[in-house]
């Protein structure tokens, strides 16, 4: 008993000891009774215990009434206080065992029950005996005595039981108020029990034990029914109370909810109004019920104007149908909202890209939902994306589709063509002749401008649907789909070439462009874009090889031509190391005296399988591939060394000159002057014995820095000559401005030289002009004695040609010098 204080402990012990002793005394008394009495006692105890299992509690009240008392009182009335005390003890023992887990209660309860019953029962018996003796016995007296007893028993039981608690809590033992309040219900129940027991007892006295046999089970049934009935009532009441509590809470919650709704509605409208993204409420037809200021700003409308308008009125035409289709789904069950990006028309006409998000929205207080639209301006991102796309698929310089885009288009054309044989296409490969020269000589800025001009010109002459792309450099490609005949494509190619003929005004310079075009057709059954481009490229090379500014169709044999070309390129790379190159020298004579005055150095390649090749067979390729540089150095070196050898070998040869051919690519190289200067100095030669030959076109192409370079060469003391004079763009009027020492009349004029012909007039004019400008004149390609004589008569100073001497090896040239120092 850990929570018991001293007084409580003492009290407990007193109760237990007294109760136990009394139980022993009573049991001893009972031992003298008959077995029938024992039987009745056992029945009473069992009924009392059984009734304890079915306590009757009035719904809503704390106290309960165990009808076991009826049977205890009956035992008391029938068998006397000792039997009733034992029965009360037994009933209390089972009851406390059932309801309490504390052993102190389980022991004290039966002890107190025995004490209360034994004491008050004895008083009742005394009272009944006294009434009998006073001859006042009878049913009414028994009833009254039983009621008195019940009050006493109740008081004794209550006081004795509650005293332990009060002692533990140091409270006054007799709390009358509490006692009276309990008395109202429990006391009444006790009184009722006592009355019933008394009535049964009286009937039993008058009518015998049979009454009890009938009444007691009936009573038990009644009690069980009452117990169940009240329990059900109680459950109902509890449910009712719960329901009420629930309703109250519900009402409170609803109120709370309404307040929250109001607050959230306010918050929503505040967010709606102040949101930086555009928002609108739409009905299912897409009309704006409300639009926030941000959306009005995006669309350039006033807030009031927007209301009632269809949102799609502001959407650009191209995207309107798509939006309406989406909105059309809004009434359906499946509709979950949608997101999209579309173009809108700002009131000022500008196009605004909006990212839209549309979903359901139920306005507070409204019973049908509407749509809420959120719009974000994504114009900047769209523009960036478009820029990236443009970058990814377009050529920066010309704005044309680039290689990647072209390959895509070509791939789909191939796919279409494979699916439908009727669908035919052609691809043209365009390469600009001498573009590299422009780039190298006039600089990349001018080259770029020329490309832009060319792209524009070509585009103006396309058929609708043709795709022109720039692959890079000066390479353009064209995809022509839906073609009927090959002729159509050839006509297009000719139109394109024709369109380029008019000069381009590029940064104040007037330039002409011409393209070589290779064409191939889908009829070759291509499987990949690469194959198409390869063949168009091959055909383009054929066009170039045939003399530039023309078109050529691809045919299968071209594959071998390309292979040959590539092989030759490879061979040329090794030619220098393999000592396959050599320089031959064509003598130049003074026509009047026939004196051998010098040589022109000409390059030769002794190809292992193709024999001796002239420069025309490999120089253009060397220029394109950059191999020209080592070749030029080689010629320069050989020519200088050879001239020195000759000059040193005989005093009479000390005045010999050497002409060296210079290409445009040579001249465009920044270190060209230095390289020439070094070669001359290394050979220990006087520079005035060297003449550099440049064609008219190279001189006239305004090679960037060419004027300074030419000036620098002249300052070094070198001589300059215009080669192939009369075929190029320079006119006689330019002649005075050219910083050159001599003119070499092109052999085409010499070839047709006859007395009185036009050519003779031209040659005569050139000779006279050169004379007045104090430039020397060289006639090349003299093949006959007559030509030589005519030129001599015209006053042409120098001449060279097969008639005079073919180009000779160094050895042969030396021999010639020895044998024939002069012309016959
Ligand atoms: P070119 O400067 O006009 O050289 C003269 C060409 O005419 C030479 O051809 C020569 O063999 C040829 N020839 C000479 N006399 C006659 C004749 O009476 N009748 C005919 N029909 N032809 C004659 P080649 O050696 O084939 O050279 C062709 C061109 O290649 C040269 O024309 C020159 O422009 C260029 N070339 C030659 N060697 C070099 C070089 O080392 N460097 C550079 N850059 N170009 C070179
Ligand atoms: Ca020449
Ligand atoms: Ca020439």
Image: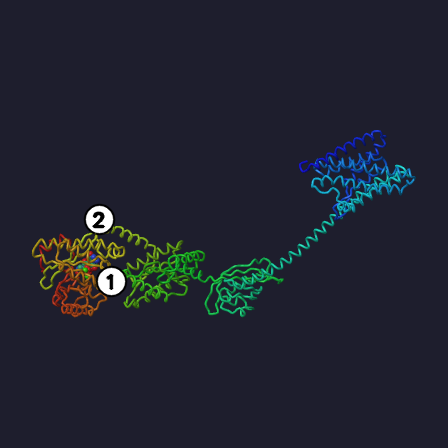
- Image side of residue 322 versus residue 191, left or right: left
Return the x and y of residue 24 as percentages of the image width and height. 79, 30
Task: Give the class, few, some or many, for how many residues have Cα within 10 Å of label 1's Cα (few <14, many ≥20).
Answer: some
Element under disc 1: loop
Picture quarter with the C terminus: bottom left
Q: Which mark is residue 704?
A: 1
The quarter of the image that holds ligand 3 is bottom left
Model colouring? rainbow
Read off the residue under disc 2. Answer: 577
Q: Residue at x 28, y 58 (%)?
A: 545
Marks 2 and 1, how far apart at CA? 33 Å
The answer to whether 503 is drawn above or below residue 518 in the figure is below
Which residue is more in the foreground, 723 or 328? 328
Return the x and y of residue 54 as percentages of the image width and height. 77, 41
Which residue is more in the foreground, 780 or 460? 460
Which residue is more in the foreground, 164 or 463? 164
């Amino acid at each position: 008993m850990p929570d018991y204080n001293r007084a409580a402990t003492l009290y407990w012990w007193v109760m237990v000891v007294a109760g136990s002793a009394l139980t022993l005394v009573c049991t001893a008394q009972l031992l003298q009774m008959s077995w029938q009495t024992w039987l009745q006692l056992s029945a009473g105890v069992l009924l009392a215990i059984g009734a304890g299992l079915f306590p009757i509690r009035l719904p809503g009240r704390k106290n309960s009434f165990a009808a076991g008392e009826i049977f205890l009182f009956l035992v008391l009335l029938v068998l006397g206080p000792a039997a009733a005390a034992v029965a009360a003890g037994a009933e209390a023992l089972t009851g406390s065992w059932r309801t309490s887990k504390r052993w102190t209660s389980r022991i004290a309860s039966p002890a107190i029950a025995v004490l209360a019953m034994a004491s008050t029962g004895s008083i009742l018996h005394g009272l009944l005996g006294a009434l009998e003796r006073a001859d006042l016995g009878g049913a009414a007296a028994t009833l009254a005595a039983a009621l008195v007893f019940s009050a006493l028993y109740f008081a004794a039981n209550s006081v004795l039981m509650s005293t332990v608690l009060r002692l533990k809590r140091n409270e006054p033992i007799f709390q009358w108020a509490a006692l009276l309040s309990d008395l109202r219900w429990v006391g009444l129940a006790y009184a009722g029990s006592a009355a019933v027991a008394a009535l049964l007892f009286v009937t039993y006295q008058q009518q015998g034990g049979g009454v009890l046999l009938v009444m007691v089970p009936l009573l038990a049934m009644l009690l069980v029914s009452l117990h169940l009935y009240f329990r059900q009532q109680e459950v109902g009441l509890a449910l009712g109370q719960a329901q009420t509590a629930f309703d109250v809470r519900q009402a409170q919650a609803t109120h709370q909810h309404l307040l929250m709704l109001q607050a959230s509605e306010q918050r929503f409208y505040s967010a709606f109004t102040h949101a930086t993204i555009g928002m609108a409420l739409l009905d299912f037809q897409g009309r704006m019920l409300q639009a926030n200021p941000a959306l009005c700003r995006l669309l350039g409308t006033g807030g009031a104007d927007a209301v009632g308008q269809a949102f799609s009125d502001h959407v650009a035409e191209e995207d309107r149908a798509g939006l309406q289709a989406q909105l059309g789904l809004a009434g359906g069950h499946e509709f979950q909202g949608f997101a999209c990006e579309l173009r809108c028309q700002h009131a000022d006409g500008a196009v605004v890209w909006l990212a839209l998000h549309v979903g359901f929205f139920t306005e507070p207080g409204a019973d049908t939902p509407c749509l809420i639209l959120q719009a974000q301006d994504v114009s900047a991102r769209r523009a960036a994306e478009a820029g990236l796309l443009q970058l990814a698929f377009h050529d920066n310089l010309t704005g044309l589709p680039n290689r990647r885009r072209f390959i895509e288009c070509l791939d789909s054309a191939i796919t279409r063509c494979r699916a439908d044989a009727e669908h035919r296409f052609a691809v043209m490969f365009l390469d600009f002749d001498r573009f590299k020269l422009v780039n190298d000589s006039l600089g990349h800025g001018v080259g770029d401008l020329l490309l832009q001009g060319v792209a524009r010109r070509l585009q103006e002459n396309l058929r609708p649907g043709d795709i022109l792309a720039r692959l890079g450099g000066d390479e353009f490609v064209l995809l022509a789909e839906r073609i009927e005949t090959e002729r159509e494509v050839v006509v297009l190619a000719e139109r394109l070439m024709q369109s380029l003929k008019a000069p381009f005004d590029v940064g104040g310079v007037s330039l002409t462009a011409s393209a070589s075009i290779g064409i191939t057709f889908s009829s070759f059954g291509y499987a990949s874009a690469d194959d198409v481009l390869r063949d168009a490229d091959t055909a383009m090379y054929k066009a170039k090889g045939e003399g530039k500014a023309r078109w050529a169709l691809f045919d299968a044999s071209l594959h071998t031509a390309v292979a040959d070309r590539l092989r030759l390129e490879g061979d040329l790379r090794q030619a220098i190391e393999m000592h396959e190159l050599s320089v031959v020298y064509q003598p130049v004579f003074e026509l009047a005296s026939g004196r051998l005055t010098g040589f022109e150095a000409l390059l030769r390649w002794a190809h292992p399988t193709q024999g001796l090749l002239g420069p025309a067979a490999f120089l253009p390729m060397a220029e394109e591939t950059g191999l020209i540089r080592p070749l030029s150095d080689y010629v320069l070196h050989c020519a200088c060394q050879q001239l020195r050898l000759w000059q040193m070998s005989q005093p009479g040869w000390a005045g010999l000159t050497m002409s060296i051919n210079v290409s445009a690519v040579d001249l465009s190289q920044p270190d060209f002057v230095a390289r020439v200067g070094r070669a001359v100095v290394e050979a220990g030669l006087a520079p005035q014995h060297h003449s550099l030959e440049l064609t008219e076109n190279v001189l006239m192409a305004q090679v960037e820095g060419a004027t300074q370079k030419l000036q620098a060469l002249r300052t070094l003391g070198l001589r300059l000559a215009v080669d192939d004079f009369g075929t190029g763009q320079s006119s006689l009027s330019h002649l005075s401005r050219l910083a050159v020492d001599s003119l070499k009349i092109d052999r085409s004029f010499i070839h047709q030289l006859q007395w009185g012909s036009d050519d003779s007039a031209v040659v005569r004019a050139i000779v006279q002009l050169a004379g007045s400008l104090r430039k020397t004149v060289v006639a090349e390609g003299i093949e006959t004695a007559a030509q030589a004589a005519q030129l001599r008569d015209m006053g042409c100073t120098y001449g060279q040609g097969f008639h005079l001497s073919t180009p000779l090896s160094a050895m042969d040239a030396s021999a010639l010098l020895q044998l024939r120092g002069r012309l016959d």
